[in-house]
Structures are given as C-alpha cells and as structure tokens.
C-alpha cells in the first residue's frame, strides 16, 4: 500500500495506544457519517472497530468510501470518550482500496434475506463474534482429546449403509453408477479404528436428509465423534461432561467480548461444571408426566419434551437407558434390563436440548446379528461392521457431539443456522 509514516497496526492495537501515536490501519467501512466539513468513518477489521475522523483534503477522498469499502487510513490516535472504545484516529490520509457501491445489506435484516446474502453478512459484527466463538470451540475439542491420549482419525464421507436409520440417508450417484450415501456419522469407522488405536476421535461433517424444518437441524453439520475401547457407558458419560466443560471454559476464557456483543449472559455457562445431572429415561418420563406431557414408553423424546425437561435443571442433563426401540440398532442392551439400552443423550440447559448422543456398543456377534434382524436390516449390508465382533471384540463406547448445536447453545443463539457461516438446510444450499 501507499508509503506511510505510521506503524501498521490492527484496530485492537490502535485502541490500546497512547495519544499522539501515528498509525496506519486497514479495514472496511463499518459506518459512515458525512458532516460536511468532517467525515466520520467507523473502520472495522478482524479485531474490532475504531472511529476515524477525516477533515481537510482527505475528507473528499473519504466521501468516496461507502459502507464496506476497503480503506487504508493513516493518522494519529487520540482519546475521545464519545468514540466506541474511547479512542479515535484523526486521519491524515484515507485511501480507498476497493469501493463498495450500494452494499446490499442496509434496511432488510430479515433472516431469509441475511441468508441469501450470507457471503456478505459474514462480515457483520454478530457473525464475526459467532465465528470467533466457533473457532475457540473447534480448537478446544482437539485440545481436549489430544491432551488425553486420543488419536485423531478420519473416516470416509461416501458410505454404503445407514448408521442412523434409512430415513435421513443422502443418496448420491457414484462414479461407477452405483448408489452410495453421504455419511450420517463416522461411528462405525471409529469402531474399527479402536482395534488399532484404542482411543480415537474425529471432527468432520455429517449429512442428514432432514425433511423437517426445525431450529436445530441442518442437512450438513459438524460432528465431533469419539470411540474408546474398554469404556463403559459411565466412562463415556464422564468423558462427555469433561469435554463439554473444557470447551465452555475455553470460550469463557477467550471470548468474553464476543459473548457480550451477542448479549449472551455467561453465568449459565459458568454453572456448567461437571458432574452433570443424570436421569434414567424412566425418571425423565415421570418428570415429564408431572409437567403434563404424555410420552408413550418406548418413544424417543422430541424437542418439546427435551425443552420441558431441561427447564428443571441449571446444568446439562444426561438421559440414559433409552428403550431399545427408541435408539439405533448398534446400542447394547443393559444386561440387567434388556428392554433398555446402555445409551445416553446429553441435553443442554436453557431450552437447547440434545447436543450429544452416545453409549455402549454391542460387542457380541450373536447380539448384533439378532438386533439387525429385529430392526429389519440386512446383515449383508453390514458385513465389515459385523466382522469387528468376529475378531477380538471388546466392550467399547463412544458418542457424537453436534458442534453447531454446541455453538448455538454457548453463543445463546435462537437458530442453528446462525451458528454456521454457510448453513445447509432443507431449503438452502446457496450461497
Ligand atoms: O444421531 S446422533 O444422535 N448420534 C449419532 O450419529 C451417533 N452415531 C454418534 C456416535 O455415537 N458416534 O447424532 C449425534 C449428535 C446429536 O446429538 C446432535 O447434536 C447432532 O449430532 N446432530 C445434528 N446436528 C445438526 N443437524 C442435524 N440434522 C443433526 N443430527 C444430529
């Protein structure tokens, strides 16, 4: 860029500098006010916003800088209690790098419109805050597992049989003309990999052809899955609560500013220290019945039931031991009570509901074959998965955490699409 005398700094640094320091900042015009003699720009970069006052000859140039134009500003830092952040830059020169005539986001801020122009809306301070929190969340997930002896692994996205039931499979035509599917979960591959690495995890997309429009379903979501040899249901629930707390703790440490910008009260998050609450499915049903819900024993809990349940708690709640027919076929039955499974969902408080599903897997060949038959599934579709029970099978458990849902809850958002830069839903694959 143009030769400048001041030091090139980020906005956040400029806000911390002393009066009289000469700086150069680069960014985008966040707000613009023309007061005739002077032009007030609010400049935005990835670190924050700062007011820039432009007078004299430069004011003419600044006038050409519309909202979201990219600019390089040179000037002197001054204190001004009226400016956001308490500092402003008194500009000596303004260079417009990329103009921005008629930036489309002005009046219409409806959710649909903002989704149509998501490629531009990602610049908003709200999205910026969410994306920074998301960054912390992903980093913390890796940090947790890597710090505890789990190996990171990768599973394929093209698969040939359902993990979570046929209804939400995404068929796609493969190169050879056959039908394959986009993965719903990396679980089965993680199960294969525990025989090599014992403790494994992955962070990857999962795909579900979700036909209903809800606030918490995407057709493509980010899935953090872990699987552990020798682990029981209790063991894996402990991993889950520690993991969730680790992530929250990191966000509280790194993203106070972003939580504030989003209007997210951090106190309910601060309360989420393990242990979380544990309720059996039967206890959950009793509680729901007292609250006027009628759930048929054997049915899975819906969003409304989950919301009603978590209202009663100030921390996440595990609901464990779901009935056999409420959960996917791979869940192991409780030897003490075969009509329920050694499964657990983790429900987030404040109305958010399910963020994790997991439990202990069937490790016996006979039980797996029987269960496939009971569920009307073809053993030939699951041959390699069945093999895992033929060669050195071990008890094992695992879980899958929906990262977008976790971000939605932590950031206090009311719709999952706002937790993702470019969401994919029933009706949206653009931009
Ligand atoms: O269907 S799950 O409950 N469980 C599984 O997929 C297991 N195979 C995971 C495992 O044990 N390795 O999905 C897990 C989580 C669920 O709790 C949600 O948080 C999230 O994945 N999930 C979704 N998030 C966003 N959109 C959609 N459609 C979605 N489906 C599941």
Image (cartoon, rainbow, N blue to C red):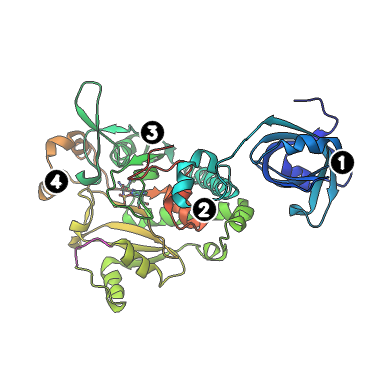
Q: Nearer the viewer, mark 1 or mark 3?
A: 1
Cβ atoms at labels 2 and 1 below 8 Å apart? no
- Seen as rendered, the residue at the extreme top is 176
Please give the label number shown on residue 372.
4
- Seen as rendered, the residue at the extreme front is 36
Q: Give the image location of residue 304, x and y in percent.
A: 32, 65
Query: Is residue 328 on the magenta stretch?
Result: no
Badge 4 element: helix
Spatial distance from mark 1 to mark 4, Cα to Cα? 72 Å
Which residue position is annotated with label 2? 246
Spatial distance from mark 2 to mark 1, Cα to Cα? 40 Å
- Seen as rendered, the residue at the extreme bottom is 290
Q: Give the image location of residue 364, x and y in percent.
A: 18, 46
Which residue position is annotated with label 3? 154
Q: Residues within 10 Å of mark 2 (few under 14, many from 20)?
A: some
Spatial distance from mark 3 to mark 2, Cα to Cα? 23 Å
Q: Nearer the viewer, mark 2 or mark 1?
A: 1
290 or 150, nearer to the observer: 290
Q: Is residue 73 visible?
A: no
N-terminal of the pair, mark 1 or mark 4, is: 1
Which residue position is annotated with label 1? 21
Quadrant containing the C terminus is top left
N-terminal of the pair, mark 2 or mark 1, is: 1
């Amino acid at each position: 860029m143009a030769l400048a005398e001041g030091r090139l700094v980020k906005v956040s640094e400029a806000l911390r500098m002393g009066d009289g320091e000469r700086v150069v900042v680069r960014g985008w015009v966040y707000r613009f006010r023309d007061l005739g003699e002077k032009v007030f720009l609010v400049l935005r970069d990835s670190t924050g916003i700062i007011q820039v006052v432009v007078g004299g000859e430069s004011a003419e140039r600044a006038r050409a800088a519309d909202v979201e134009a990219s600019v390089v500003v040179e000037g002197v830092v001054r204190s001004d209690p009226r400016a956001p952040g308490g500092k402003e830059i008194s500009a000596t020169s303004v260079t417009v790098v990329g103009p921005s005539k008629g930036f489309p986001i002005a009046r219409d801020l409806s959710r649909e419109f903002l989704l149509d122009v998501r490629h531009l809306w990602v610049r908003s301070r709200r999205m910026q805050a969410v994306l920074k929190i998301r960054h912390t969340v992903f980093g913390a997930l890796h940090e947790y597992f890597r710090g505890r002896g789990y190996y990171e692994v990768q599973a394929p996205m093209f698969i040939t049989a359902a993990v979570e039931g046929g209804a939400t499979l995404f068929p796609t035509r493969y190169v050879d003309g056959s039908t394959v599917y986009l993965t719903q979960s990396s679980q089965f591959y993680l199960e294969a990999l525990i025989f090599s690495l014992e403790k494994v995890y992955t962070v990857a997309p999962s795909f579900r052809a979700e036909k209903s429009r809800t606030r918490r379903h995407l057709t493509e979501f980010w899935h953090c899955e872990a699987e552990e040899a020798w682990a029981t249901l209790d063991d894996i629930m402990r991993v889950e609560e520690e993991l969730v707390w680790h992530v929250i703790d990191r966000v509280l440490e790194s993203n106070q500013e972003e939580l504030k910008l989003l209007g997210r009260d951090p106190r309910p998050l601060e309360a989420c220290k393990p242990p979380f609450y544990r309720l059996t499915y039967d206890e959950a049903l009793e509680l729901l019945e007292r609250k006027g819900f009628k759930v048929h024993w054997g049915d899975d809990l819906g969003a409304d039931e989950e919301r009603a349940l978590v209202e009663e708690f100030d921390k996440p709640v595990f609901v464990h031991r779901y009935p056999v027919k409420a959960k996917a076929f791979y869940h192991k039955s409780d030897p003490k009570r075969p009509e329920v499974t050694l499964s657990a969902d983790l429900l987030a408080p404040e109305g958010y509901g399910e963020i994790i599903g997991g439990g202990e897997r069937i490790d016996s060949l006979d039980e797996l074959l029987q269960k496939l038959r009971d569920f009307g599934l073809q053993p030939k579709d699951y041959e390699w998965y069945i093999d895992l029970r033929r060669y050195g099978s071990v008890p094992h458990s695992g879980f899958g955490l929906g990262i977008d849902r976790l971000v939605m809850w932590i950031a206090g958002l009311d719709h999952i699409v706002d937790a993702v830069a470019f969401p994919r839903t029933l009706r949206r694959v653009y931009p």
